[in-house]
Amino acid sequence: MNMQFLYDPTGFPMVKLRRFDIQLLPVTKVQFETFMAESGEFGDSWYEEILSVSPRASYRNCANENRENVFITGLLPQEIMKFARWMGEGFALPTVAEWRDIYGCLSYEFIKEYEQLISKCPSQQASCLLKRLGEQLGIDSWLKISLMKDGLLEWTMDGNAWVGLGSPRSEFLPNLYNPFGEVVRPIDTNTRSPYFGCRFLRRY
C-alpha cells in the first residue's frame, strides 16, 4: 500500500487511512504555538507553566536525549479540545481502538515516500523535524518515524474516559507499557504530566 499524505492546518503531515486521516507525528510545540498566536486562547504566563513541565527542544537540532521535548506535553483535556476545535471540523483524539488500528497499519509499512514527503511538506518546521528524526531513528518503518513506538504516552478516549497509550523509550519514561495491553489511567487528569502528549485524527 502506498502512503497517501495530506496536511493539517499547520502544514504538518497527516496519513490517509481507511476511515480517517491521522497526524503522522505527535503535536509539536511549534504547532501549538501557531494555535496560540492565531487564536489568542492562552497567554505567556500560561505557556511558562507548560514549559516548566515540558522544556523546549529545537525541531532543527534536537538531540537523541531530548527529542521528546520537541512535542507538547502537559496539556489538560480541556486545553487539548480547544486546540482540536481550532484545527477544524472532524479533528479529535482517537479512541483506544482507533489508536491501535493506526499502530497496526504503520507497523506494516516500509519507508518509500520519505524523501518525497520531506521535499513536499508545506511546513519548513515539519520538514526539518522529519529529516532530524530520520537521522536519529533510521527510516525503515513509519511506525518508528511516527514515534507511536518509543515516543510519548498519548491521550486517547476510552468511552468518556481520558486514557493513555504508547510505549515510551526507557530513557524518557522507565516503563513496561504495552500499547495492546492495559491502557494507562492517570490518577488525576487535572495534573499536568510531562509524559502525556497527543495526536489528532480527522474523521469523515
Image (spheres, rainbow, N blue to C red):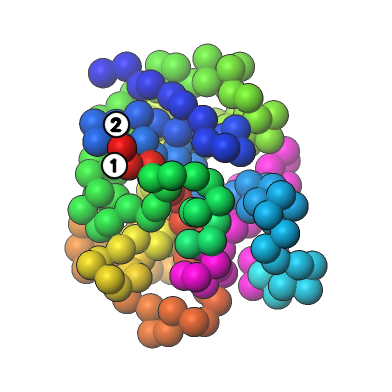
Provide residue 196's location: percent of width, then percent of height. 47, 65
Residue 139, relative to residue 70: is it above or below?
above
Quadrant of res 158:
bottom left
Is 74 part of what is drawn in magenta?
A: yes
Q: What residue is at 72 percent from the left and 38 percent from the top?
A: 60
Quadrant in the picture for the N terminus: top left
Question: Does 75 appear above or below 92?
Answer: below
Tags 2 and 1 touching, CB below 8 Å? yes
Q: Quadrant of residue 54?
A: bottom right
Q: Residue furthest front?
A: 89
Pointer 2 residue = 17
The residue that disc 1 covers is: 102
Gap in Å between the C-alphas at discs 2 and 1?
8 Å
Going from N to C along the chain, the mark reached first, 2 or 1, is 2
Answer yes or no: is residue 127 visible. yes
Tell me if residue 177 is in the magenta stretch.
no
Q: Is residue 33 visible?
A: no
Q: Dominant secondary structure of the magenta stretch?
A: loop
- Disc 1 element: helix
In front of the other: 142 or 77 = 77
As drawn, the residue found furthest toward the bottom would be 187
SS at mark 2 in the image: loop
What residue is at 51 percent from the left and 30 percent from the top?
7
The numbered dot on residue 93 is none
Q: Residues within 10 Å of mark 2 (few under 14, many from 20)?
A: some
Give the extent of the magenta segment.
52-80
Q: State left or right for residue 27 relative to residue 184.
A: right
**Residue 40, percent from left and from top:** 72, 59
